[in-house]
Amino acid sequence: MLRILIYLLLAVLFAPMPYGYYQLVGFVSMVVLTIMAFLFFNEKRKDGRYTLVHWSLQFQPFIKIALERMIKDTVDVIAGNR
C-alpha cells in the first residue's frame, strides 16, 4: 500500500504542479520511505533497506540537495518502481 502511494505521488510530478505539491511529495516520501526502511530493518530483510534510507534522505524537504532536472526525474522513476 505504501509503495502505491509513493508511486502515484511521484508519477504526478511529471505534470506541471505548484511548488507546494513538490514540498508535500518530499515530506510524504521521506516519511513513507523511512517507515519502509524501518520495517525492512525490523524484518531483517537485506534487499534495499539502505537504498530506502538513501531515498528518504534524498526526498527530505528540509535541506535541499541540488540536482539537475533529468537526474531528479530519473530518481523519481526509480523510486516509484522500487
Image: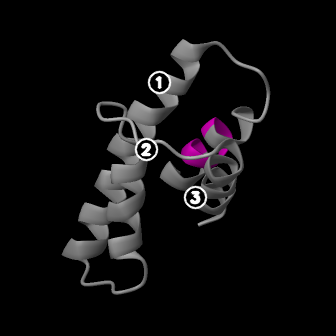
Q: Residue furthest right?
A: 15
Q: For this view, does 42 lie left or right of residue 62?
A: left
Q: Which mark is residue 2?
A: none
Where does the image place residue 57, in percent across and percent down from the top left? 33, 51
Label 3, label 2: how far apart the Cα atoms are = 10 Å
Q: Earlier in the sequence, mark 1 or mark 3?
A: 1
Amino acid, disc 2: Phe
| Picture layout, residue 35 above or below residue 10 | below
Q: 68 or 1, which is in the foreground?
A: 68
Where does the image place residue 67, in percent across and percent down from the top left? 54, 46
Q: Are marks 1 and 3 in contact (CB under 8 Å)?
A: no
Q: Which residues are magenta?
A: 5-9
Write down the residue under mark 2.
59
Q: For this view, does 2 lie left or right of residue 71?
A: left
Q: Residue furthest left?
A: 42
Front tag of 3 and 2:
2
Q: Secondary structure at mark 3?
A: helix
Where does the image place residue 41, in percent across and percent down from the top left? 23, 74
Write down the residue under mark 1.
24
Q: Are marks 3 and 2 in contact (CB under 8 Å)?
A: yes
Q: Earlier in the sequence, mark 2 or mark 1?
A: 1
Q: 39 or 81, which is in the foreground?
A: 81
Circle 3 residues within 10 Å: few <14, some 14–19, many ≥20: some
Q: Secondary structure at mark 1?
A: helix
Amino acid, disc 3: Ala
Q: For this view, does 10 lie left or right of residue 36?
A: right
| Picture layout, residue 19 above or below residue 70 | above
